[in-house]
Image (cartoon, rainbow, N blue to C red):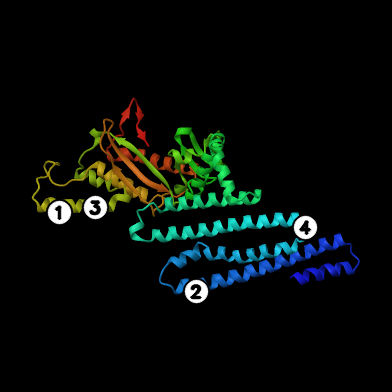
Amino acid sequence: MERLKHMLYDFFISIGMSESSASYLNMIALLIGLLIVVFIIDFIVRKILLGVFSKLAKKSKSNFDDLMVNNKVFRNVAHIIPLLVAIKYVPMVFSDFSEVENFIEKGLIVFGIILTLWVVRSFLNTLKDFFKTLPRLKDKPIDSYIQVFMIFAWIVGVFSAIAIITGIPFLNFITGLGAASAIIILVFRDTILGFVASIQVSINDMVRIGDWITFEKYGADGDVIEINLSTVKVQNFDKTITTIPTYALISDSFKNWRGMTTSGGRRIKRSLSIKLSSVKYLSINEVNKLKGIQIISDYLTTRQNDIEAYNTNNNTDKSLLLNGRNLTNLGVFRKYLETYIETHSAINKDMTIMVRQLAPTSQGIPIEVYAFSSDKRWQNYEYIMADVFDHVIAAVPYFDLEIYELDTIVNVSE
């Protein structure tokens, strides 16, 4: 390489170029050559490392090496060798341009620090994933321990990079920083808190731009549009914008709706209150009348046969409906609602579907519909929920039931 350097320079001089032009062209040619060599070495080393360790991982009984491959440990390590080659030959390429050489060398060393942090992060993520597979460590806060090590690594890496850029020895830089730490903390308190919070938010994947969050303390209910060191901006559904301190995301409680948006449906959880005095046992004639409702006709026939067989076997006196087993209009109504929800085209059938009776209150017996709409978009979700309860409310009188009313207002609560 050293011989090539002089050959190129001498060639440019021999064809009549000035010494200055020859130096620049020589530097450019060597730089292009070095970049090509570095890329080739990076490609070869990466292919070899990934190929060898991928085969070893498949043959190994332990899943640790598989996790290392999945977390790109070897891919990141492969970049170290071409980087070392680049650092070694940069002085030769820029030997006639000492200021540029110094700048490039520092840049490569800083990149080496970043690359080392990538390797450390990949390895720590591998340890985290591996520890989570161990039964005795499943209930331990592994994420917190890994975060502490990662934060420490980032601090050391950032301080090392700053020390290299400024040319101050690392120990002297740390010593001077310690003496000024009180002033730094006082002046940059919010920035430091925001920085720490940003790392925590990023590592824990707590909030992303585009997430719908609800933060009652700050009156925020909408989509995250910006996250920076000091603030998080939320555009509420009324198009106002709420600004939240970044560190509040780790110090206070908030709700992130991402789990809902990435799931198979959006929850419908709403109840209506049935008047207590309208609940009753059903006579045979009333049961036969309700068989006209198609979606519960087979259910009523089966249940009626079972109940009649039970009462006959136990010689039950059915002159009084209270005796023995009986159907109630409220029970049949619940079964009707459950069947109706299960057959509704807009309800996700793979998620929980339930119609349940809650504890009676002074305002009647709450009957709650619990299901998930397939369409999670707000406007469509509200339409589906309204469509379901339009039908539910209209169906109540068919079962000789009444919705509890207070001051002529139907009590439908969510």
Point out the frontmost of discs 4 and 3. 4
Q: Position of 12 compared to 101: left or right?
A: right
> Label 1, label 4: how many angstroms apart (C-alpha)?
102 Å
Would you place residue 196 above or below residue 117 in this image? above
> Label 2, label 4: how many angstroms apart (C-alpha)?
46 Å
Point out the frontmost of discs 1 and 4. 4
Horizontal and vertical percent for residue 399?
28, 40
Reading the image, the residue beneath label 1 is 309
Horizontal and vertical percent for residue 4?
77, 71
Q: Mark 2 Cα within 10 Å, few/some/many (few <14, many 20+)?
A: few
Give the amino acid at mark 3.
Answer: Thr
Q: Which one is earlier in the sequence, the residue at label 1 or at label 3? A: 3
Reading the image, the residue beneath label 2 is 55
Q: Position of 94 compared to 20: left or right?
A: left
Give the amino acid at mark 1.
Answer: Ala
- Numbered tag placed on residue 301 in the rendering: 3
Q: Position of 167 compared to 204: left or right?
A: right
| Viewer-closest of 221 and 115 | 115
Give the amino acid at mark 2.
Answer: Lys
The reply to whether discs 2 and 4 touch (Cβ–Cβ < 8 Å) is no
| Viewer-closest of 240 and 206 | 206
Reading the image, the residue beneath label 4 is 97
Q: Which one is earlier in the sequence, the residue at label 1 or at label 2? A: 2
